[in-house]
Image (cartoon, grey):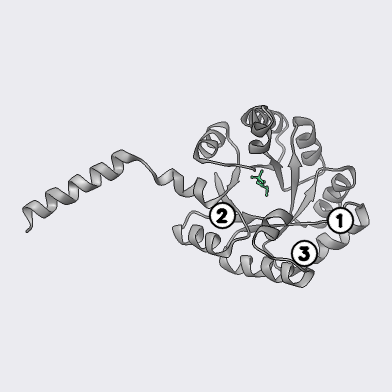
Amino acid sequence: MKFFIDTANLDHIREAQQLGVLDGVTTNPSLMAKEGITGHDTILKHYVDICEIVDGDVSAEVVATDFEGIIKEGEALAELHEQIVVKVPMIKDGVKALKYFSDKGIKTNCTLVFSPGQALLAAKAGATYVSPFIGRLDDVSTDGLNLIAEIRLIYDNYGFDTQILAASVRHTMHVIDCAKLGADVMTGPLSAIEGLLKHPLTDIGLEKFLADYRKGNS
Ligand code: E4P
């Protein structure tokens, strides 16, 4: 299972990279705005800065919603750095653009996916990644994890290569449940990744080992 971090915060990206478990980064316009990254050139430079910190795929989202606009913006994003994956929304012109990029060998991440039918379309169009938003489904009393299970079943039935990128992951149990269900990738905040470290018995056990060592070696 690949671990992506879902942020535009360079300190968080560095922290996850230094842990040695990071496989990539996802961003979106809201995450960029949260870090105060605004203005076309500043946003493009920020994507390059992110690519220079991590080794893996970095999703950069288009803001155009028409086919020509998505293509123009996506091609410019892909030119920025070899690690860039063009993030395209699940709309009609987005599906057409996924197919176009796929035919040109440009990697894509189909975002804002909330149903198995949308995921099937993304795979048919040749998306590299599909991003079902599990946290946002949970927010509206719908089982986000069930969507991961449904997409896994459909993709396995037909051997689709599109990777299931569980997005809108909010906490460590989302990560563990996505791993059990066979998501190829999860993207979440630094807290969801670092939360996997925590267990009180580890802390208690380490304290006791060190205390016993000190007793015998003082
Ligand atoms: C996916 O790529 C999105 O950036 C993200 O996971 C959305 O998460 P949120 O629902 O916590 O905003």
Q: Secondary structure at mark 3?
A: helix
Q: Residues within 10 Å of mark 2 (few under 14, many from 20)?
A: many
Residue visible at 48% across and 60% down in the picture? 15
**The image quarter in which residue 134 lies:** top right
Q: 106 and 149: which one is in front? A: 149
**Three-letter amino acid code at the position of disc 3:** Leu
Residue under pointer 3: 77
Decide if residue 28 is in sight here: no
Q: Residues within 10 Å of mark 3 (few under 14, many from 20)?
A: many
**Three-letter amino acid code at the position of disc 2:** Asp
Q: Secondary structure at mark 1?
A: loop
Mark nearer the viewer, 2 or 1 = 1
Mark nearer the viewer, 1 or 3 = 1
Residue 214 vertical placement versus 156 (above, below): below
Q: Secondary structure at mark 2?
A: loop
Quarter containing the N terminus: top right
Whether tag 2 and tag 1 are in contact, CB under 8 A, the answer is no
Residue under pointer 2: 23
Distance Cα–Cα, label 3 vs label 2: 20 Å
| Left or right for 50, reference 208 | right
Distance Cα–Cα, label 1 vs label 3: 12 Å
| Residue 3 drawn at (x, y percent) | 55, 49
Residue visible at 76% across and 63% down in the picture? 78
| Residue 14 drawn at (x, y percent) | 52, 63
Residue visible at 69% across and 30% down in the picture? 140
| Residue 19 drawn at (x, y percent) | 45, 57
**Three-letter amino acid code at the position of disc 1:** Ala
